[in-house]
Image (spheres, rainbow, N blue to C red):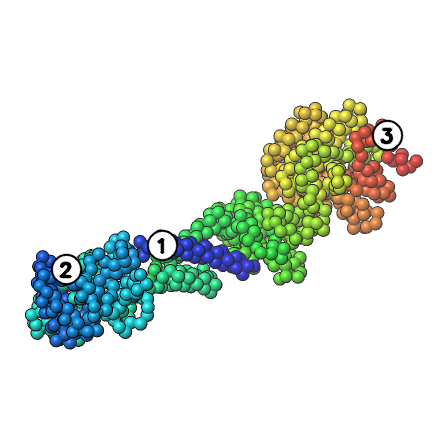
Amino acid sequence: MGQWIANKGGALRLRHAMIAFAIAVVLSAVTILRPADIALWSLQSKLFSHEPSGEIVLVTDTSRDFDISIDNSNVALIGALEQLEKAGAKQVVLHTPLREGDVEQINQRLERSIALLGEKAVIARSISSEEPMGVSTERNAPRFEKTSKIVSSYVKQDFLRFVWWADPSQTVNATEYSSMWKVLVPSYEPDRAIYPDYSIAVRSIPEIDIYALASGDPETLKAVSSKRVIVAGLGRDDRMIKTPDGHAGLIGPAKLHALAAETAKAGSGQFFGSMITVPTTAVLLVLLILASKSNHQRRIGYGLLATGAVIVFFVAADLGLRVLLAEPAVLLILYAAQRATANWRRRHLYTDPRSQLSNFIALHRDLEAEDNLRDRVIVVAKVARLDAMFATLRGSEQGEYLRQIANRLALSNDRSGVYHDGGKYFAMVLKKADYPDLQGHLEGLRAIACQAIMISERALDVAITVGVDQSSDARASNRISSAIAAADQAREAYRPVFIISDFETDSEAWDYSLQSRLEAALSENRISIKLQPKVDMQTGLFVGAEALARWTDKERGEIPPNQFILQCERVGRLDELTKRVMNRSLSASCDLAAAGQPAKISVNVSAIQFVDNRIVELIEKSLLETGANPANIMIELTETARIENFARAREIMEQIGSLGIEFSIDDFGVGSGNLDALYHLPFRELKIDRMFANSVSTSAEARKIVGSLMSLSREMGISSVAEGIDNFATFEMLRDMGGDLAQGYCIARPQTLSLLQETLSLQRGDGILKKYKG
């Protein structure tokens, strides 16, 4: 059972994980969390600092004198190019405007200087299909580009002017242009974007002045020897870029490409998008759920998962990896929120506060989620006289009492498989296949559960009946109700475990198909009564009758009273049925009295109705409406074993008794009518159950029991009624034993009021005695 519940909890966790995963996937698709990722990347760029390789050098105009003439600018550029060739630079990337000046001789020299560099010279300018005309607005003079490779310095900025990736190439008008950063790292083979590692200190990338280089300064020449050089010192950069580390300030595309090249040389700059991070996180979460066997293990796993996410964050920052972490974080947050909500619901909505056990709302939820409910057995244990027990216990002791019962029902300290409705009912769900002898198992379980419980050094009794539903009905609510009703039907004395197999094939008392027709019969006042006469055994004279409820259904004919009375109880219409039977019985008493005939009528009322003043009000209203004489009314209290609070029941009986009505205890001698009730409650009549009364002629044990009951009634000053007498020999024996009253088929069957009146009008002399003697 515990495993079944664990599986249910695991299934719910898996469902929460899948929901969180689906939402994270959607968020990834719409990139709504990209600002969060940017914030995380910005934070990562500030955590670590790595020095660049120094193999890429920028040549710039450190004086930032942008007002010099084109000819002077070209002279400085010519000098720099000549010195770079002399120093043996590996590569020269010209990311500066190449314009023709007024002096043709200078233009020719610049053209020759670029040509002398040969393949080492690369000309970079902003080229992108995203820009107007596909190229930058500032063009180089064609004569300077004739012998050199053209590359693109274009980089895409986000809304904050940050650059997070640089494409390996740009394609415009079917022509592919490599990106500047990629030609700076020829060994970089993957044809994918690079994600600049801002932990590499941008401000530490070597930068020398173009005029110092053109002058042939030895230190400057040493700095560019065998290096890859970007000449970006003349003219303004076409765009300025913000760096997230907050140290380098605004930089141009040339420095950004230098950083991208340094990133590629360091082997970092890889990107792990949500298509990797979200499924990986989901898989790890699912594996954790499946592998964890307890809440403790799950908590450790959740902690490791959260710690792992933090470690990934720092490792990615240190290694220069660009990882999308916002979506996985949202996945974990959504899962945690669902689990927190579920735990809150379990604690508050699905948990009984007194016992701390899952309640019947949780039971209904779990059964509704069950794939094959027909393979499950629903067991309900009812604790008798619980309210009376709780009257002697403090709140904490009450919870302990309930939890100890749950431990016994679970056969362990793991109560996860036991539900509690907050009152007197516990429930469990078992697999049919696991219990071939279900009756024996539950009887043994009940025997264990009914052992005394120690609370504060006091031994407290436990009385339990067990109801079981193992029907094929697929509706959880019906099966729970059925198991509860079965527990109510069970009797401590002779049937402590009551099992219902199937509503369609089992006892007619459990036929749910009658519910709708019963509702209609009650609404249309189609419940009638028949009257079974009672006689004085010593005189043979009729002294009254018992009113028996009758219902004849249009489709199924006459329905046995024990069936539809139980149905009324189950659907909450017992008061309605009692009211109709009471009114008809009191009206019959009035008619008999008006005809001068014995008008004493006994009416059956269930003991479970003696819990509040509703039954008192019902009887008072019926007396008022019919005008019946209360002295002619006897209430036969049935199901007295179901009384849990005798003090309350006695108080209600005394209120009714003050009206002039007397009480009879029905079916005495079996589980439903017992000495406990006879001792506590004010009865004036004792009805000996037919099982004993009808067996006195054939069983010595039955004669002894009946004789004892008759003697008991005489000593208590109350009348005895032998019911269910089927033959006159039994009647005579009971009369000779000193019986007071009798009823049964040998005297008269239940009949209508008109037929009873006709029978009573024929009564003469010694009544039924004359009938048999004659």
Front one among 2 and 21: 21
Q: Are circles 2 and 3 on residues that touch, CB within 8 Å?
A: no
Q: Is residue 484 above or below residue 716?
A: below
- Distance Cα–Cα, label 1 vs label 2: 37 Å
Picture residue at 9% right of the left edge, 61% below the top: 102
- Numbered disc in front, either 1 or 3: 1
When asked about the image quadrant of residue 320, the answer is bottom left
Residue with the mark numbered 2: 235
Task: Give percent across and percent down for residue 605.
Answer: 68, 37
Task: Give percent across and percent down for residue 402.
Answer: 53, 51
- Distance Cα–Cα, label 2 vs label 3: 134 Å
Residue with the mark numbered 1: 31
Residue 88 visible in the displayed image: yes
* Sooner in the amino-acid sequence: mark 1 or mark 2: 1
Name the side, left or right, on which 334 lies relative to 739.
Answer: left
Labelled disc at residue 375: none
Q: Residue furthest right?
A: 774
Q: Residues within 10 Å of mark 3 (few under 14, many from 20)?
A: some
Front one among 161 and 204: 161
Picture residue at 11% right of the left edge, 62% below the top: 101
Front one among 766 and 91: 91
Labelled disc at residue 763: 3
Q: Work out which quarter of the rendered image holds the C terminus and state it.
A: top right
Dot 3 amino acid type: Gln
* Sooner in the amino-acid sequence: mark 2 or mark 3: 2
